[in-house]
Image: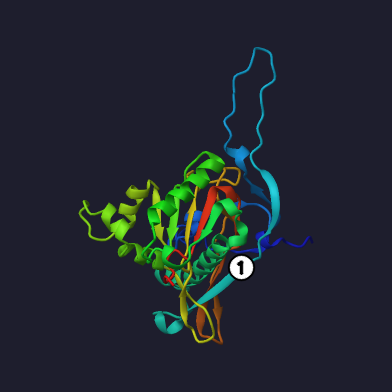
Amino acid sequence: MAQQTPGQARILDPVLSEYARGYVQPGLVGRSLFPIVPVQMYGGKIIEFGKEAFRLYNTQRAPGSNTKRIASGFQGKPFSISPSALEATVPRELMRDAEQVPGIDLGSRAVSTVLRAMNLEHEVNCATISRLAANYDSAHKVALLGTSRWAGSTSDPSADIEAAKEAIRASIGVRPNTAILSPSAMNALTFNAKILDRIKYTSRDTPTEAILSQLWGIKNVIRGDAVVSTNAADDFGDVWGDDVVLAYVSGNTQANAEEPSYGYTYAIEGMPLVEQPYWDNSAKSWVYGVSFDNSPVLSGMVAGYLIQDAGGAPA
């Protein structure tokens, strides 16, 4: 008898799998830069996009002439998706009848516990890619120093944002539609004299994401509030550090890897998946396992811009 593939052997809980795919966790912003697109294989080449992906083409043709053709990106750096899984338990003490599989409420709570951990891991992976200066060329990044940081006396956040927007527009012909602000960068704007002067005729004394969206002409201005334990002492640090990331991200609700965009999360089709619960007699608990095999990838560096240390303390 032929050996079953992992996909054939997996026994799923379809109801909780649908719940898992629709799960949204407040405070996490990684998917705003790296929306999820399904892929079939665990490895391959990233479909990357350069300036040609945004080029204007003359589609007119003479009668009988050949139709022009365009390519949707090119195969660049390799990607690899490692299988990822995590389990949560439902102790029998929480159940009225230990002989029965937990109901959908207890099951969804267990799945939510797992998804919180998995989504935070994804957030950290997205931030690591976005904040790595080596991923950008010299025209698509800047490191703010001293009093030019947004809490400094000589800073001009709107000028920094406009420079970033222009760098992206000059590269792809489209302005960014997404800006991720670290908490420290957002806090610095609260007291920045130039920002406060620009918004003094609004109904708010301090800038909000909605006000900054209007001020800067960027559709999605989002603060990344996630924190993560950074060492064995469980000290917490901001996932997005002191940085700001601007990007043009595909706005297609049915995102696909051939659509030009700053980044994507390649995820095995159908993920995340919730396994059928099983009884662990030693733990006296029902166990719920979730698999979410994914990998965020940078697919269009020229569609992004990194502002380092915007929220850092001025020297």
**Image quadrant in which the C terminus is located:** bottom left
**Position in image of residue 76 (x %, y %):** 70, 50
**Position in image of residue 99 (x %, y %):** 47, 79
The answer to whether 253 is drawn above or below residue 135 in the figure is: above
**Position in image of residue 116 (x %, y %):** 47, 70
**Pointer 1 residue:** 84
**Position in image of residue 106 (x %, y %):** 42, 72
* 121 and 11: which is toward the camera: 121
**Image quadrant in which the N terminus is located:** bottom right
* 85 and 151: which is toward the camera: 151
* 123 and 281: which is toward the camera: 123
* 50 and 169: which is toward the camera: 169
Residue 250: tell me if it is visible. no
Residue 305 lies left or right of residue 219; in this view the side is right
- Amino acid at the residue labelled 1: Ser
Residue 78 lies left or right of residue 51; in this view the side is right
Number of marks present in the image shown: 1
